Image (cartoon, rainbow, N blue to C red):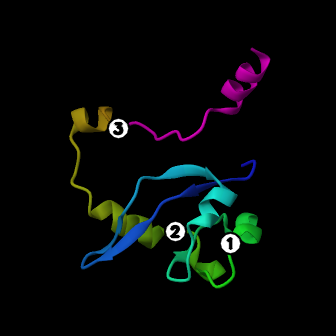
């Protein structure tokens, strides 16, 4: 994504992992400046951002970088069931403009 990475910090709890910060879209170089040897890095974008990851930062093995169906199920099973009104309130999270919006902004 044009040198950008989706980044979110998590912390371990008694129940597993929970977000410690909001999900953000950052330039890979900016994201990498906050990485230290105590941090583990995961996700499908590691190979794209590999050159920005400082030496000593630990990365998850390739087979652990994508969520499995089991992991998605476990995460979803912790969310309370929603009624129709709750489902209608769900909205996607857009962290960047669509390609069409970017093209329109460039044309303006």
Residue positioned most to the front: 33
Tag 1, which secondary structure?
A: loop
Residue 95, percent across and down?
54, 41
Q: Is residue 56 left or right of residue 82?
A: right
Residue 22, percent across and down?
42, 53
Query: What residue does disc 3 label?
Result: 90
* Residues packed near mark 3 inside 10 Å, few (<14), some (14 to 19) or many (20 plus): few
Tag 3, which secondary structure?
A: loop
* Residues packed near mark 2 inside 10 Å, few (<14), some (14 to 19) or many (20 plus): few
Q: Is residue 51 left or right of residue 70?
A: right
Task: Give the mark nearest the N terminus, 2 or 3.
Answer: 2
Measure the C-alpha gap from mark 1 to mark 3.
34 Å
For the residues labelled 1 and 2, say whether their Cβ atoms are less than 8 Å apart: no
Q: Is residue 48 left or right of residue 77?
A: right
Q: Residue at x 21, y 40 (%)?
A: 83
Which segment is the magenta one?
Answer: 91-108
């Amino acid at each position: 994504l044009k040198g950008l990475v989706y980044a979110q910090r998590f912390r371990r709890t008694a129940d597993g992992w929970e977000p410690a910060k909001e999900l953000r879209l950052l330039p890979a170089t900016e994201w990498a400046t906050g990485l230290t040897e105590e941090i583990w890095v995961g996700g499908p974008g590691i190979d794209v951002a590999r050159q920005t990851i400082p030496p000593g930062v630990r990365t998850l093995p390739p087979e652990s970088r994508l969520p499995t169906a089991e992991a998605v199920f476990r995460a979803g099973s912790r969310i309370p069931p929603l009624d129709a009104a709750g489902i209608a309130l769900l909205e996607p999270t857009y962290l960047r403009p669509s390609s069409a919006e970017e093209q329109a902004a460039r044309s303006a």
